[in-house]
Structure formats: C-alpha cells, structure tokens
Amino acid sequence: MTTTMAAKVKFEMEYLLKTSPKVLENMISTPSGLSEWFAEDVNIKGDVYTFIWDGSEEKARLTSGKNATKIRFQWLRDEEDGNDCQFEMAYNVDPMTKSVVFTVSDYAEEEEVEESKLLWDQQVSDLKRVLGA
C-alpha cells in the first residue's frame, strides 16, 4: 500500500426497480434491509454503520438522509485521510410511469472506477433478487 493518495473521481449509476418506495427505503436505511443485499451483516452504533463482508469490516458514518429518499455515508478511512468522498443511495418515483429509479453515487480512484461499477451492478442485482424485481 502506498502512502500517496490518488484523487478519487465521482461516478453515478441508475437502475430501474420494480418495487414500492417504502420497501426500497427500508432496504437502504436499516441494518436488516442493508444486510439482505449490501453486506453480510450491518450494525449501527450512533451514526456509525459497520458493514461486514467475508469476515472483514468497514465502518461508515451516516452523514445525511436516514429514512428519506436519499441516504449518504462516508467511509471512516476516507474521513481519517481527510478525503470528503461520500457514497449515496437515492431513489425517486417517475411521476408518469410510477417506476422507482434507484441512483448510486460513489467515488473511486480513476483506475478502479470500472471495477467499482461492476461491484455496484452486483450489489443492485442482489437487491433486485431480494425485492423479486
């Protein structure tokens, strides 16, 4: 691991989901919802969420939006590095079609953006499976 900090770039992805806004809100804002698709287990202490994958854990601070159409987190490792990169999950309902549009905004080092997008595609694929969408 190098000590130089590569600049991270922001990317956004949109997904069309066949679900109700209320169900999706629960899936992105509660530990039980997040542990069904985003991580193997999720714990909360105050405003810090601990996400557990394959026995390793990452902590993120909830920075805005609990129980709303948008939820934003900052990884504590980025916070400690003075890096203000936050990831966000949001949704809105198209007024014409009533479809739920799920949007992910995240940051990655430039050479890791494609890998990060593939990871989000997999996570959202898991979410769709859980939703039956």
Image (cartoon, grey):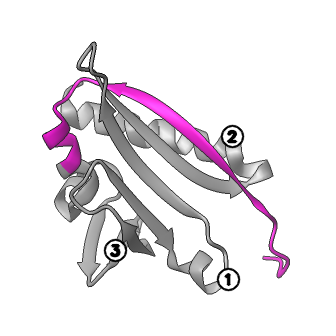
Work out which residue is located at the far top of the displayed protein and give it. Answer: 97
In x, y percent, where is residue 4? 85, 77
Give the image location of residue 28, x and y in percent.
Answer: 28, 52
Tell me if mark 1 has few (under 14), some (14-19) or many (20+) residues whose alpha carbon lies within 10 angstroms of its own: few
Q: CA distance from mark 3 to mark 1?
A: 18 Å
- Label 3 crowding class (10 Å Cα cut-off): few <14, some 14-19, many 20+? many
Q: Quadrant of the N terminus?
A: bottom right
The amino acid type of the residue labelled 2 equals: Glu
Residue at 66% across, 74% down: 83
On whether residue 14 falls in the magenta region, the answer is yes
Q: What mark, if any, has residue 114 been given in the picture?
A: 2
Left or right, 103 with reference to 94: right
Front: mark 1 or 2: 1
x and y percent of residue 24 in the render?
Answer: 22, 42
Q: Is residue 27 above or below residue 13?
A: below
Three-letter amino acid code of the residue under disc 1: Asp
Alpha-carbon distance for marks 1 and 2? 23 Å
Q: Earlier in the sequence, mark 1 or mark 2?
A: 1
* Residue found 41% across the figure and 43% down from its top: 123
Amino acid at circle 3:
Tyr
Going from N to C along the chain, the mark reached first, 2 or 3, is: 3
Tag 1, which secondary structure? loop
- Give the residue pinned by disc 1: 81
Badge 3 is on which residue?
A: 49
- Range of magenta residues: 1-25
14 left or right, relative to 11? left
